[in-house]
Image: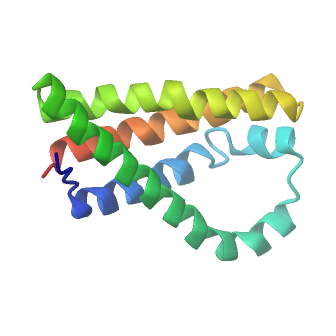
């Protein structure tokens, strides 16, 4: 079986993840609490962000591609709707990979529980958005 992933969907999904992160980590949502719990120096953060953002976008592209890849497989195996496949795939990947990885590594790094909740919440919103978009913009 050959897997087809819509590359326009991958790009749109990655952009959505970046937009969600920008809003989610803004001061009006969880930004202030996240920075305090993470002990982030705002000046250093502002200085490093322009250098880090391209790598974050590449990671978002890779994540979106993987969501699209498994959405295609899910859709073809279960023969349901594309949107349903995208959402279900996203939930499975979030719970089985993202949430568990964040929990394990953050727990071992002795991160505060609130910080773990913040990180897993962002990943849930981002990956769900990716699945929805890739379900709508499918091959």
Q: Is residue 23 left or right of residue 65?
A: right
Q: How is the image coloured?
A: rainbow
State the image coordinates of residue 25 (x, y, percent, origin top left): 63, 47
The foreground one among 113 and 25 is: 113
Q: Is residue 7 left or right of residue 122?
A: left
Q: Quadrant of residue 130?
A: top left
Q: Residue furthest front?
A: 1
Q: Is residue 123 left or right of residue 65?
A: right
Which residue is found at the position 84% from the left and 43% from the top? 38
Which residue is found at the position 84% from the left and 38% from the top? 37
Which quadrant: the N terminus?
A: top left
- Does residue 121 appear in the picture of this structure? no
Total labels drawn: 0
State the image coordinates of residue 30 (x, y, percent, origin top left): 67, 38
State the image coordinates of residue 101 (x, y, percent, origin top left): 65, 33
The foreground one among 72 and 134 is: 72
Q: Is residue 7 left or right of residue 112?
A: left
Which residue is found at the position 11% from the left and 29% from the top? 81
Q: Quadrant of residue 77?
A: top left
- Does residue 104 appear in the picture of this structure? yes
The foreground one among 23 and 77 is: 77
């Amino acid at each position: 079986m050959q897997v087809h992933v819509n590359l326009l969907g991958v790009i749109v999904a990655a952009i959505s993840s970046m937009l969600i992160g920008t809003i989610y980590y803004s001061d009006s949502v969880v930004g202030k609490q996240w920075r305090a719990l993470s002990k982030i120096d705002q000046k250093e953060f502002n200085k490093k962000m322009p250098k880090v953002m391209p790598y974050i976008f590449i990671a978002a592209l890779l994540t979106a591609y993987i969501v699209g890849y498994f959405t295609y497989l899910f859709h073809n195996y279960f023969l349901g709707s594309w949107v349903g496949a995208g959402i279900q795939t996203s939930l499975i990947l979030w719970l089985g990979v993202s949430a568990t990885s964040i929990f394990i590594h953050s727990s071992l790094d002795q991160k505060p529980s609130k910080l773990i909740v913040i990180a897993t919440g962002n990943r849930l919103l981002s990956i769900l958005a990716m699945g929805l978009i890739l379900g709508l913009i499918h091959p």
